[in-house]
Image (cartoon, helix red, strand yellow):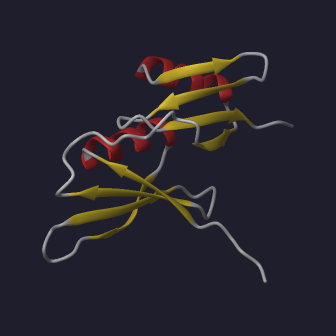
């Protein structure tokens, strides 16, 4: 029996703001969308051509308030081939929330407060 991770879900308050953030910050683009006839939710899957893994962004009509994501002890990690350029972009965006210089990594925070780890491609 083999299991393969295929996606992770984040619930978001402002879907368009989140889509713009993930495209600019991490190059993730919409690959498909699910919208029921009653408009009670919208699910958008974002990804890029470098991995099979997708991030599922879910907007719920009846949940307009900010999500309580606890103590932010979980995160999704991204390896990047040009760490310096990524750091510069994220610094310009003002979304770097924590840096661990001794480990050579940093974290950015999306519009809903989810932490995303950025790791250099080690060669």
Judge whether 108 appears above or below 79 on screen. above
Task: Say which residue appears at 86% left-offset and 37% top-offset.
Answer: 123
Residue 105 in the figure: left or right of residue 8: right
Point out the image quarter for the N terminus.
Answer: bottom right
Residue 78: x and y in percent read 63, 42
Residue 114 in the figure: left or right of residue 103: left
Task: Say which residue appears at 15% left-offset and 77% top-offset.
Answer: 37
Residue 68: x and y in percent read 37, 40
Query: Quadrant of residue 20 in the image?
Result: top left
Residue 57 in the figure: left or right of residue 119: left
Residue 3: x and y in percent read 71, 74
Looking at this view, name the residue that lies furthest to the left.
Answer: 38
Residue 54: x and y in percent read 52, 60
Task: Say which residue appears at 58% left-offset and 37% top-offset.
Answer: 73
> How many dots with numbers?
0
State the residue in front, 46 or 76.
Answer: 76
Looking at this view, name the residue that lies furthest to the right.
Answer: 123
Task: Say which residue appears at 67% left-offset and 31% top-offset.
Answer: 82
Judge whether 36 appears above or below 69 on screen. below
């Amino acid at each position: 029996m083999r299991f393969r991770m295929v996606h992770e879900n984040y619930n978001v308050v402002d879907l368009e703001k989140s889509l713009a953030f993930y495209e600019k910050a991490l190059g993730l683009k919409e690959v498909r969308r699910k919208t029921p006839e009653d408009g009670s939710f919208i699910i958008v899957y974002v990804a890029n051509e470098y991995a099979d893994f997708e991030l599922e962004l879910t907007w719920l009509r009846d949940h307009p308030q900010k999500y309580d994501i606890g103590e932010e002890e979980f995160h999704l990690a991204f390896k990047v081939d040009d760490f310096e350029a990524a750091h510069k972009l994220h610094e310009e965006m003002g979304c770097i929330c924590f840096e661990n210089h001794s480990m050579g990594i940093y974290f950015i925070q999306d519009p809903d407060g989810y932490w995303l780890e950025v790791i250099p491609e080690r060669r």
